[in-house]
Image (cartoon, rainbow, N blue to C red):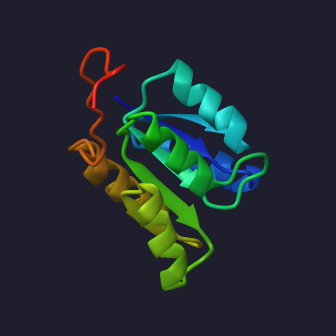
Amino acid sequence: MLSVLLIEDDLDLAATVVQYLELESVQCDHASNGVTGLNLLSLNNYDALLLDLNLPRMDGISLCEKIRAEGNDTPVLMLTARDQLSDKIQGFQAGTDDFLVKPFELEELVLRVYSLTRRRSGQVTRLTCGDQIGRA
């Protein structure tokens, strides 16, 4: 069974998405703000992250940038009412893997989740090599 985290502040939409995903055999945790979502990400391993762009406490762009900087390569599907190319560019530059513009069909959401989870995003590579102090 797939496990995803939905970070969405619209509680009605979140309840609908969680229920639908569970009917499709996808286990879904929910956080209603960016900080709580970030905490859940640090405590659990998810197959995908469903991330609203406009969130209280930490917006979706900042959250995505933070997890990518930490080396987290969990596939990210941004859910947003913003449909301008500039918004999508900003999201892709932050590290998202895909966008779904609200309102969306729940069936399409499930298809995109399964598509993203068939492979890891692979876009984050974090290399470290011993102690680099004093080396030029």
| Percent position of residue 129, x then y | 24, 21
Q: Is residue 83 visible?
A: yes
Number of numbered markers: 0
Q: Could you say which is closer to the camera, residue 125 or residue 49?
A: 125
Task: Indicate left or right for 30 with 101 as reference.
Answer: right
Task: Indicate left or right for 42 with 76 as reference.
Answer: right
The quarter in which the N terminus is drawn is top left
- Up the image or down, 82 lies above or below 124; here it is below
Q: Residue at x 42, y 64 (%)?
A: 92
Q: Could you say which is closer to the camera, residue 136 or residue 104?
A: 136
Q: Residue at x 30, y 50 (%)?
A: 116
Quadrant for residue 132, please give it.
top left
- Up the image or down, 92 lies above or below 7; here it is below
Q: Could you say which is closer to the camera, residue 54 or residue 64?
A: 64
Quadrant for residue 37, please give it.
top right
Q: Residue at x 74, y 55 (%)?
A: 10
| Percent position of residue 31, x then y | 67, 38
| Percent position of residue 120, x then y | 25, 41
| Percent position of residue 21, x then y | 48, 44
The quarter in which the C terminus is drawn is top left
Task: Indicate left or right for 22 with 12 as reference.
Answer: left
Q: Residue at x 74, y 51 (%)?
A: 9
Q: Is residue 105 visible?
A: no
Q: Residue furthest top?
A: 131
